[in-house]
Image: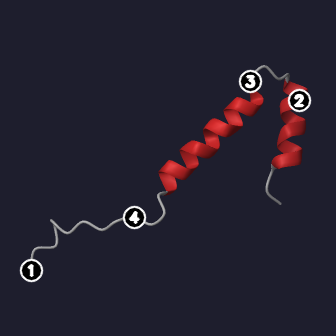
Amino acid sequence: MNNKNKVTEKKFDTVKIFRVIKEEISKDLVGKSAEQIMEYLKVNSLK
């Protein structure tokens, strides 16, 4: 059996999703001060 050529379709691409999330956060933080960024992180961080 040759398993090297077997390609499986990903149902969830972690790298792609993480990249999208990072880009959204970057857009939200553009032009904000350090204090505003800290407040953003407090409000939007996972608990």
- Mark 4 or 2: in front is 4
Secondary structure of residue under mark 2: helix
In the rendered view, tell whether residue 31 sits above or below residue 20.
Answer: above
Numbered label attached to residue 30: 3
The quarter of the image holding the C terminus is bottom right
Residue at mark 4? 10
Q: Residue 1: percent from the left, percent from the top? A: 9, 80
Q: Residue 37: percent from the left, percent from the top? A: 83, 32
Q: Is residue 45 left or right of residue 3?
A: right
Secondary structure of residue under mark 3: loop
Tag 3 or tag 1, which sits nearer the N-term? Answer: 1
Looking at the picture, which amino acid does disc 3 mark?
Answer: Val
Tag 4 or tag 1, which sits nearer the N-term? Answer: 1
Instruction: Report the Cα–Cα distance between label 1 and label 4.
Output: 22 Å
Residue at mark 1? 1
Look at the image and name its color scheme. Answer: secondary structure
Residue at mark 2? 36
Looking at the picture, which amino acid does disc 2 mark?
Answer: Gln
- Mark 1 or 3: in front is 3
Tag 2 or tag 4, which sits nearer the N-term? Answer: 4
Instruction: Report the Cα–Cα distance between label 4 and label 3.
Output: 32 Å
Of 40 and 24, the residue lying toward us: 24
Q: Is residue 16 left or right of residue 41?
A: left
Query: Could you tell me which residue is drawn at 79 percent across and 56 percent down?
Result: 46
Secondary structure of residue under mark 4: loop
Q: Is residue 35 left or right of residue 2?
A: right
Looking at the picture, which amino acid does disc 4 mark?
Answer: Lys
